[in-house]
Amino acid sequence: MSLSSVDVIRIPTSGPGDTSGLIKLIETGRIDPKSILAILGKTEGNGGVNDFTREYSTVALAGVLASRLGISTEEVEHRIAFVMSGGTEGVLSPHITVFTRTPLPASQARRTEGKRLSIGIAHTREFRPEELGRRAQIAETAAAVRKAMTEAAISDVADVHFVQVKCPLLTSERVDAAEARGAGTVTKSSYASMGYSRGASALGVALALGELAAEPREEDVLRRWDLFSAVASSSAGIELMHNVVVVMGNSVSSSSDLVIGHAVMKDAIDAAAVRAALGSVGLRADGTSNAAIGERIVNIFAKAEAAPDGLVRGLRHTMLNDTDISSTRHARAAVGGLVAGLAGTTAVYVSGGAEHQGPAGGGPVAVIARA
């Protein structure tokens, strides 16, 4: 069995194009560019169709790494999984999280006990516009999840605690291109397409991990809210036309000093679930030691969603009816404040739009911490 050392470094950013923190850690030897497997980031855009901070951040980071790896930016983006999530409403702090993996010599004895953090990445093929939100995206995502699990040396689905997917969305040009070929898209709305793409991707994760009793149908996307993954997190963006999959879990093949655990929020104010996620990695949020918790946490990843029935525990909310601010921005701010308060840090990764990612109105929350 080959061993690897996995590390996760969280770096604050002053803007979507800020690469200074990454450069400093590379120059001081803290990060070896060759070991970088994935970079997840929170950027201060609107998180919508026209949020170009995601692409801006990806291009900036890829440019820095291309010059140090001696390859093109296109090759960097294929080699490294970039997942930029727009929207840092409320107290959320912009940052990037860098995941590295270094193979260990076969002769090196394992120094840790139990299973430790391991990650794997995979890319689907390019999708045609008419395939978004449909069977092809579900199936291809499921295949990519299985491939990433193999790369991470995770054989038991119970050891998978978070699956981050970056998926595409539809633009008017992409819709027109499909119609020119006589193919209809799942929707003509760019904004609505984000939900379809996120939802189909999440169902693909659920399919791969055996979380569904039967293979989901196309008509289940954004309709069967009882079908979901407890560990999926999908983020849609304009900057790609394929899915990028990052599987995070624990494996005996990893000698990392990090572990990951998760829980599932039933709604946007489910503090008990956040505490349970912290508890899954040996942390206790009792309201008195949150600063110490913040020091041990490497990062928290959570999904946020406005309950589709317009209620939170029987009381009406207005997130779905606000013309000025989209519901995903409301949800990110609400869940971000809850998670930050319990975790003792505002540099947490909270992504909006949790279609089929946890129960309707809720979502998964995962914690990476030092063991």
Image: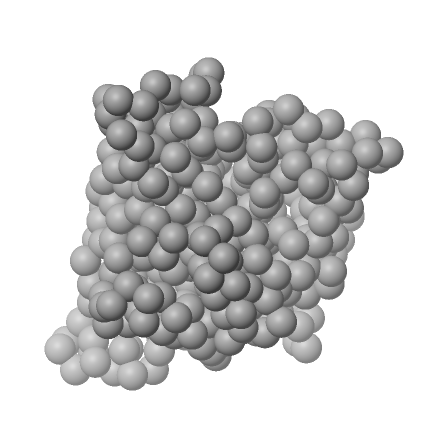
- Quadrant for residue 294, please give it: top right
**318 or 24, which lies in front?**
24
Residue found at the far front of this picture: 28
Quadrant into which the C terminus falls: top right
Q: Name the residue: 43% across, 20% down.
A: 111
Residue found at the far left of this picture: 181
Q: x%, y% of residue 336?
A: 68, 53
Q: x%, y% of residue 332?
A: 64, 58
**209 or 189, which lies in front?**
209
Quadrant into which the N terminus falls: top left
Q: Name the residue: 40% across, 46% down.
A: 100
Left/right placement of residue 137 relative to residue 329 reads left
Q: x%, y% of residue 350?
A: 59, 53
Number of labelled discs? 0
Is residue 47 visible to us here? no
Q: x%, y% of residue 90?
A: 73, 63
